[in-house]
Amino acid sequence: MKLILKIKSGALQFTVFVAVLIALLLTGLILYAYTFIYMKEQSKGAIENIQFADIGIQTLLVQKEFNTDTVQVDFVKKENQIIKIHLSHWGIFHKGITVTQFRKKKFIKVAIIGSRINATESPTLFLKETHNALTLVGTTSIRGIAYLPLQGVNSGYIAGNSYYGSRLIYGSIKKSAKELPKPEKTVLDAVQYYLKEYRISNQEDFINLNSSSRIINSFKSKTKGYYSEYPIVLENKLISGNIIIKSETAIKVKKTALLKDVILIAPIIEIEDESQGCFQAIASNKITLGKNCNLSYPSVLLLFQDNKDTPNKNLNISFDNQIFIDTKSIIKGSVCYIQTKEIPDFQTQIVLEKDAKIKGQVYCNGNFELRGTVSGSVYTNQFVANQSGSIFVNHIYNGTIENESVPAIYGGIPLEQEPKTVLKWLY
């Protein structure tokens, strides 16, 4: 006797449903596992992008020769991971860019790079050897490592005032040299290019200063700028980022203008009282910073005088070829006077007025009149003090140079043979 079993269609459908459900679950698990692994790899790649970007910047910091070509870092051996680095000038500093890519994900890091200054080891004062002793008068105070001429330092007397300190130098004294440490040649070449040749070459790189009250250009984009043969007045505007503004005549910065990380280029640059911002001012004739101004780090006031073809005689007009920083102003960064031919004279190239402060670096291969305070480092050919109708050479009268109110490590203008550091991360 044969048994005939009949499977109902509902049971068959249920079996098929279960099979399909199991297949979908297995497919989902496989997709989940693949997606998890893929996302984990992408996340790891993104993290490594950031880490490798730091490797790219570190590579630029130790790079011995200045090279503006974009190059690929080849010591990182990882599939689908690429690191490219690029070095260019940004005013008197270097601009380092590193681009890391994992598959289609990119990460860009941009930094301003300058020479590294160690507050406890670097010179607080480097006075060039001119066979003339440094003389201190009044409430002058020098704290830190002082590189001085062979004749050393002594106390002096001006207008009825002697030196009131208990020690001449509050720190160690070392022998200076006949030459100041030199800025990198590529930096000087770049400054001359800015002053003499820089123009806006393409219309798409031109910005209209009258178009908006807010003008911002990322450092991850191409540099843009504004050029005029006539005076430029900056007021009632926020101008920020990868922007260069040049006038063949003069630039005046009003206190209603807020400038951030831009470069100003003109023969004469005037910054109004109570102005604030962070920028580089590069001039060939004169820079004046008014009263109660506050420029944040790493701002730059740079006066560059290309006088190598000038006859060796004094043709200066009073107050020309001078950086003047008025009372109660603060600049955090670098103040530089650079001349291509050092002409011995008694003109004053940098004046820091009473109650004015520079937190950072002063570099002057001319004459520096110090009436205020420098917190950081000073490199100068010589000091002058204009008092009672007389000029006192290598005298400091009521001035202060100290290294206690600055970070342990900070940055200044790129100097030959000096290690590099990041001054600021850009956007």
Image (tube, grey):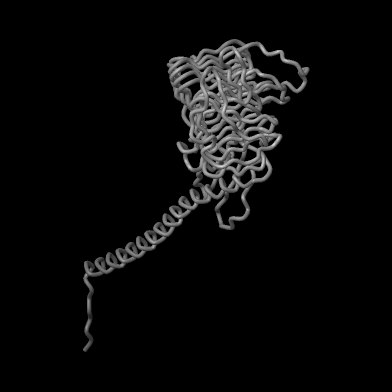
287 with respect to 255 (left or right)? right
Of 268 and 126, the residue lying toward us: 126
Query: Looking at the image, can residue 204 be seen?
Result: no
Against 265, residue 190 (above or below) is below
> For residue 256, what is the image quadrant?
top left
How many labels were placed on the picture? 0
Of 150 and 313, the residue lying toward us: 150
Residue at 51% over, 13% down: 233
Of 166 and 173, the residue lying toward us: 166
Residue 27, given in percent of the width and then of the height, sits at 37, 62
Toward the bottom, the furthest residue is 1
164 with respect to 347 (left or right)? left
Residue at 49% over, 33% down: 375
291 with respect to 55 (left or right)? left
Q: Quadrant of the N terminus?
A: bottom left
Residue at 23% over, 68% down: 9
Residue 332, given in percent of the width and then of the height, sits at 49, 30
Of 423 and 426, the residue lying toward us: 423
Residue at 59% over, 12% down: 389
Residue 406, given in percent of the width and then of the height, sits at 47, 37
Against 426, residue 36 (above or below) is below
Query: Looking at the image, can residue 257 be seen?
Result: yes
Residue 185, given in percent of the width and then of the height, sits at 70, 34
